[in-house]
Amino acid sequence: MQAIKRKKQKETIIEGFFLICAFVAVISVLAITVFVFYNGLKPFVSNSYPLWDFLTGVEWRPGSNMYGIFYMIVGSIFATFGAILIGVPVAILTAVYISEMAGSRVGKMIRFAVELLAGIPSVLYGVFGLGIIVPYVLKISPMAQGESLLATIMVLAIMILPTVVSISETSISAVPKEYREGSYALGASKIQTIFKVVLPAGRSGIMTGVILGIGRAIGETMAVMLVCGNPIAGIPTSLFDQIRPLTTNIALEMGYASGVHQELLYSTGVVLFIFIMIINLAVNKLVKAKVGS
Amino acid sequence: MDANIKFNTKNLDLFYGDFQALKSINMEIREKEVTAFIGPSGCGKSTFLRCLNRMNDLIDSVKINGEIIFDGQDINGTIDVINLRTRVGMVFQKPNPFPMSIYENIAYGPKCQGMKDKNQLDTLVKESLVKAALWDEVKDRLNKSALGLSGGQQQRLCIARTIAMNPEVILMDEPTSALDPIATAKIEDLMSSLKKDYTIIIVTHSMQQAGRISDRTAFFLMGEVIEFNETPIIFTNPLDKRTEDYITGRFG
């Protein structure tokens, strides 16, 4: 009797421990959100800096009390959009190649390479970008420097590959073989089968990969910081213009900023946060709407 | 060569790796008849069926010896597989409509062959659905997903999709095994009406089904064809003891 009771107590304690572990994630996300929003909204609530000027300004000069992030928002969006435009097709075709075409040995090799790519620290992507991509961009650029929107897009396009490839590959492999058989039996070629049946059937999984890719691209800081140029003003109008994404703005100055300057760096974080939320929700909705039809 | 022989296999062997799944199959299949393959699970009947439109190509370890003559041509030779599959259609055990609209499911095959004209496609979709006895049930929702249909409707859609290619032969791999009796009866009726236009070859687990719908029946056992004859003979007066044992339910 005593033994059974003790055993039951032990079970309860262990269960409680699991619950605490599970709550670490929930509490963390809440804590970060509250902390960033609390600090980031302060300057607008206390009217120490006008929200409108913050969101629409195109110059960031803390020395002259000018804190405009509009050009950063544009830079972040352009960089992310460009990375998706280049990276996603490459990633999806890689996934198709691995799961539908490559023999098992070649497939394994490519998959291994992609996994390694995922494990490389982002600062090394930045160093690679600075050492290889930036000089190349400089060669073809009309500007005096190679750090640019273009270099940022290239580095980000490579960085999102592992995420999009591995998730797309999983969802392509999960497409029932009955669909493929049905297609072949109707006299469709391999390419027709892949593009008309397999990819559409795996669409929702592939879109999940793309969302995560977008998240990675818009949130990347370290690698981008080394290749984007970080100008203090100016909306980018060409691929060779420098950009200053929201993320690098925070990382560059948070270390020494204080007062309103520091608070507005938090505000930059809030904007970034909201952006990621909007993109996630929008793409999610898009996927659901398409799958539903 | 007899003009109404559609398929003629000569000493057909098939191996999965080291395992021999088909042993020296010699069979003549006639045009515009229903030929049924029966036999216990794993006897090779589905494997043989899948040889006839080269669906076994999709499996890496398969090796085939011998000849399969289709309209005078060896299909394991230099023929165009895509062309073969447009002439020899297939309906599978589990209904497998694509996750797209009913219309697109039917238009898929013709579109893959390059048919683009909207009117032509519309006509073809309608004709195929009428032939597959599905038109009345789906005519108001052609643009709805095919996955919303019942299992029996899905299978008739798959038949319609095959008919849309205007094939000469339709292979059916246990097409009713996933369906209820009413849906099964509808498919069987459909097969009888299709046989005037198409050569039908069906694998079935149900001997009653083979008896009801087929003109000729082949009994498979352990990768061999034990007996192949007119269906009434197979069911009433089989020549081989093993056929009789199987028919009368002594094993299988």
Image: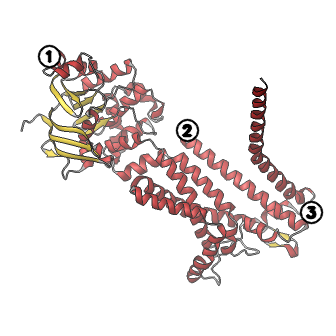
Distance in Å between CA atoms under marks 2 and 1: 55 Å
Q: Residues within 10 Å of mark 1 (few under 14, many from 20)?
A: few
Mark 2 and mark 1 on one chain: no
Which of the 4 quarters of the picture holds residue A257?
Answer: bottom right
The amino acid beneath tag 3 is Ser
Residue B237, numbered circle: 1
Question: What residue sits right under mark 3 in the picture?
Answer: A48
Mark 3 and mark 2 on one chain: yes
Mark positioned earlier in the residue sequence (3 or 2): 3
Distance in Å between CA atoms under marks 1 and 3: 101 Å
Which of the 4 quarters of the picture holds residue A251?
Answer: bottom right
Mark 1 and mark 3 on one chain: no
Name the chain under label 3.
A
Mark 3 residue element: loop
Distance in Å between CA atoms under marks 3 and 2: 48 Å
Residue A292, numbered circle: 2
The amino acid beneath tag 2 is Gly
On the question of residue B252 being in view, the answer is yes
User: Residue A174 appears at what percent x and percent y?
Assistant: 48, 44
On the question of residue A84 being in view, the answer is no
Q: Is residue A152 left or right of residue B9?
A: right
Mark 2 residue element: helix
